[in-house]
Amino acid sequence: MTTNPWLVPVTTLRRSLGNRREEHRYGRVGELRVGDTIVGSGAEVEADAILDSVDGGVEVTATVAAPWASECRRCLKPVTGVLRAQVREMYRPRGFGEQTDDDDETYPLGGEQLDLGPLVRDAILLELPIAPLCRPDCRGLCPTCGADLNEGPCGCPPPAGDPRWQVLDRLRDPSEPSE
Ligand SMILES: [Zn+2]
Ligand SMILES: [Zn+2]
């Protein structure tokens, strides 16, 4: 039997305003991807949540942690990390036939339970690094020979656009207008 790890019972919580319930949950959320960065379908995601019974629904304050994998945008080596996202969101019961307009940024509240899954997924998608670096000063790959410049200089001349070479280019080609 597979149980949804993100479902939290709320019947008791909602009996009176001001009730609070703390939940520590972990489980899978399915594969999430932004650019080249993914949270794998087998990744274990954690959520520390505080649920408050408030006027109009349940307010959820949560810290979400998820491991991600990607590649360095400069040298293309695999990079992994763990993101931490803080969120505060409202869960509100939907009335019969109630229109859910696009401006409504609340999550649906069932009569007896609340599903943390959509909140956890949204929090991850907002925080996933789209183009991470393996380290802040990654030197990347040589555009000419493709060597990993983190392992030392490759011996290629500096790429076109390097001001030292533009001067030489102008000397060699007199037709190019000088500035
Ligand atoms: Zn890198
Ligand atoms: Zn090179």
Image: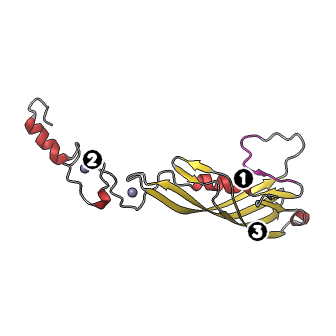
**Pointer 3 with pointer 2, Cβ within 8 A:** no
Q: Which mark is residue 118?
A: 1
Q: Nearer the viewer, mark 1 or mark 2?
A: 2
User: Which residues are drawn in magenta?
Assistant: 101-110
Pointer 3 residue: 23
What's the residue at 56%, 58% (across, down)? 68
Q: Does the beta carbon at disc 2 come under 8 Å from ligand 2?
A: yes
Residue at figure coordinates x 85%, y 58% from the top left: 113
Crowdedness near tag 1: few (<14), some (14–19) or many (≥20) residues, C-alpha within 10 Å? few
- Would residue 64 appear left or right of 141 to someone viewing this image? right
Q: Earlier in the sequence, mark 3 or mark 2?
A: 3
- Secondary structure at badge 1 equals helix
Residues at circles 1 and 3 in contact by the CB criterion of under 8 Å:
no
Check disc 2 and report its element: helix, strand or loop.
Answer: loop
Crowd rating for badge 3 (residues with CA inside 10 Å; few <14, some 14–19, many 20+):
few
Q: Report x, y in % for residue 21.
A: 80, 69
